[in-house]
Image: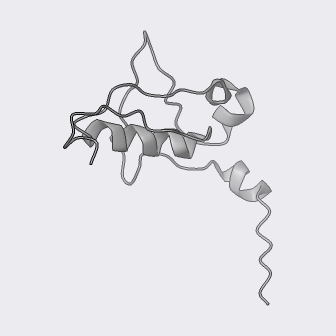
Amino acid sequence: MANIYDVFIQYHTCGSPIALAAALQLEVVIPNFLIHEHLGRYGYDDTIASCKHNYQPKDGYSEIPDLPGIGQELTEETMENADLKVTVK
């Protein structure tokens, strides 16, 4: 709807490498995309180490993932350390 009214948008991200990859994929296809929000949390070593790919901006620009899906995967270590307890009531 924003595009219909000539309004630009900034997609809000929540600070994980998965959210970053998803945001980049979405932003590249939105005709009224204006600016990418890049949180400081994206640059933390533990955040970067949680996934296989690092999409940090270079010279003010971000590379668009060209891998399958959203272009990001959790590392084996991240998956092994995940708390996968599921409670069914």
- In the image, taking residue 6 as reference, residue 59 lies left or right, namely right
The quarter in which the C terminus is drawn is: bottom right
Q: Position of residue 42 (x, y in %)?
A: 62, 30
- In the image, taking residue 48 as reference, residue 72 lies left or right, namely left
| Residue 5 figure quarter | top left
Q: Position of residue 29 (x, y in %)?
A: 25, 42
| Residue 17 figure quarter | top right
Q: Residue at x 80, y 72 (%)?
A: 85
| Residue 60 figure quarter | top left
Q: Residue at x 26, y 49 (%)?
A: 1
Q: Position of residue 69 (x, y in %)?
A: 38, 54
What's the image's color scheme?
A: one colour
> In the displayed structure, would residue 35 be above or below residue 4?
above
Q: Nearer the viewer, residue 82 or 33?
A: 33
Q: Nearer the viewer, residue 52 or 84?
A: 84
The furthest residue to the bottom:
89
